Amino acid sequence: MAQILTAARPGGRNRDIPGIDEYGYAFNDLLQHMARSHYDYDLGDETIMAEAGGVRGGKLHVNQAAYELIVLPPIRTMLRSTYELLLDYLDAVGRIIAMTPGAAMIEGRSSEDAVRLYEHPGVTIVGSKEEAARALELRVPRLVSLLGPYGAEAPELLYMLKETDSYYSLFVVNNDRDRAVDVTVSTALIGCVERWDALTGRIDEVAVTLADGAAMRFDAHLGPADSRLYIIYKKKPPAEASVGGAAAGEARPSSGLAAVTRQADAVLEQAFGPSFRFARTMPNVLTLDTCRFRLGDADWSAEEEDIWSAQRRIRERLGMRPVHQNGMTQRYKWIHEPHPNDGTQAAFRLTFEVADVPASGVELVIEGSQHYRIFLNGTEVPSSPVGWFVDRSMDRVPLGGGLVTGRNELELHCLYRQALEVEDVYLIGDFAVSPDRRIVKEPLMLHAGDWCLQGYYHYNGSIVYQADYEHQPAAQRRFILELGDCSAVTVEVRVNGHTAGHIPWKAADGIDLTDYLAQGPNRLEIEVMGSPRNMFGPFHQASGGTPTTSCESFRKEGKERTPQYLVQTYGLFGQIKLWSVPAR
């Protein structure tokens, strides 16, 4: 926080928000680099350090935690208590790796003391996060090393290590969603290693190689977005790999389902698709996020624009503070204050196209329906909700039978006030949405591929793909379902109504259906679970998707905005295959 408070323009009044953001991004980048370099660390809170910090035995202690090396990120200032604690630590033969630029202030005031701290012989100055990691390697051995096939730390992998009285738990995750990683796990912790499969509950002992009794290592293969959980028992000796026996890292017996298509003795029993019967688990959705607006009896605005943008212009005209972005003062502190222009008549006009009028009707989903008079094609619709959708604040309002083929107009009239925030609205029901965002008839079958382009452009539920299979059991063979390429939050596989397994990430593909299949006809259901992403957005980022989503992701203008809608692909992308393999 002290770094943020000192990031002010001359005069100290207006905060340098872009500069603050840049500092935050750079700091997070440093933390990610350290994590990807496989160094465990804690973040030092200066207030806690002032209360519980001390130097004992050449280490900096914060309560019960002891640290033999400190990394100072680029900072502007530090507390006097921090300066004194670090100086005591350095005088006790402590070591600090300090990144430039270094602090030139103590508690926000220029100080020669801060400058002298960096001149201490126990301080190593580095200019980048890469140099900081290399300096760490020269001074502190890793407790856990994750080496890729070329002998360097594998940056795709992250780990978390925890200690209990009797064992250590080591969790390793592959942060790459597309590529597998072969890695050698090396650690100074020595003990019996078990691999726990958190998805299936299976536990296997892992053979390791010991290095002079000071470290052990074993190999692991992590598929895309895959993870491993290892338990290392302190008082139980490890199972050592032997010549001609189990290789270090192989679970005994071998765990997991191999890529069945690569087994020489795998037999393709049946392929399903590429066309499937299917069912939705939720109503389909058409998102309406653009409008024209007017205040009082004025003319409608000339051009359609995003609802958030229309609201910004309304609030500017009424002299109200903006709500389209989060500001420095949190909204709850002022949003409910009375405003002189509370009660101004406002209206929003939204349009949509209908090619096929749904037989079962359509509902409007809108936040706070009680604030609006709702008109569909000039006819007022009662605004009383009949329930909610996705969130309890989002009311479901039946629109009756007023939809027509072609262009439809939906008007929302309200008495605008400072506390009101008009949000995007949604149409839901039993219909499909074409890629050009018209309401059309639903398809009878769903083809392998992106379901957004087959009628479910803004859909936020699951699609259940259905298939029939005539099963003939075979002695000493297991039947494995291979899903193949797909896009989903997660996938559930059911056989005759019973859950046979889940596929939450690519490496978990390959569900053993043997114990669920009955001789004769069987019904397979593959529930591919979507998310609210395509209902809520963001849709109009000209640059495409970004690693993080914030309010700014939804507020794009000028060259940063595209009028087209960018959605996330979902669905099964190929045939589903059932294989039989020898029982193990």
Image (spheres, rainbow, N blue to C red):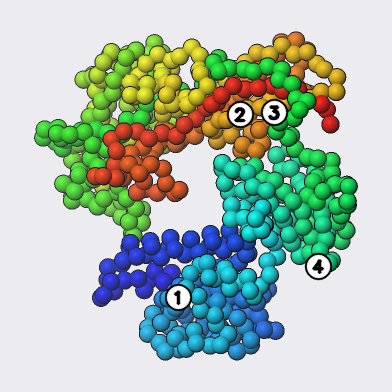
Image quadrant occupied by the N terminus: bottom left
User: Between 125 and 287, which is closer to the camera in this rendering?
Assistant: 125
Could you tell me the amino acid type at mark 4? Ala
Q: Residues within 10 Å of mark 4 (few under 14, many from 20)?
A: few
Distance Cα–Cα, label 3 vs label 1: 53 Å
Question: For residue 100, which numbered disc appears in the image?
Answer: 1
User: Between 394 and 532, which is closer to the camera in this rendering?
Assistant: 532
**Mark 3 element type:** helix
Question: For residue 484, which numbered disc appears in the image?
Answer: 2
Query: Horizontal placement of 405 versus 490: left or right?
Result: left
Q: Position of residue 207 (x, y in %)?
A: 83, 51
**Mark 1 element type:** loop
Q: Position of residue 453 (x, y in %)?
A: 42, 24
**Mark 4 element type:** loop
Mark 1 / mark 2, whichever is N-terminal: 1
Distance Cα–Cα, label 2 vs label 3: 11 Å
Q: Residue at x 28, y 23 (%)?
A: 352
Could you tell me the amino acid type at mark 2? Gly
Q: Residues within 10 Å of mark 3 (few under 14, many from 20)?
A: some
- Does the CB distance between marks 4 and 1 fall below 8 Å? no
Distance Cα–Cα, label 4 vs label 2: 43 Å
Name the residue that disc number 4 marks: 214
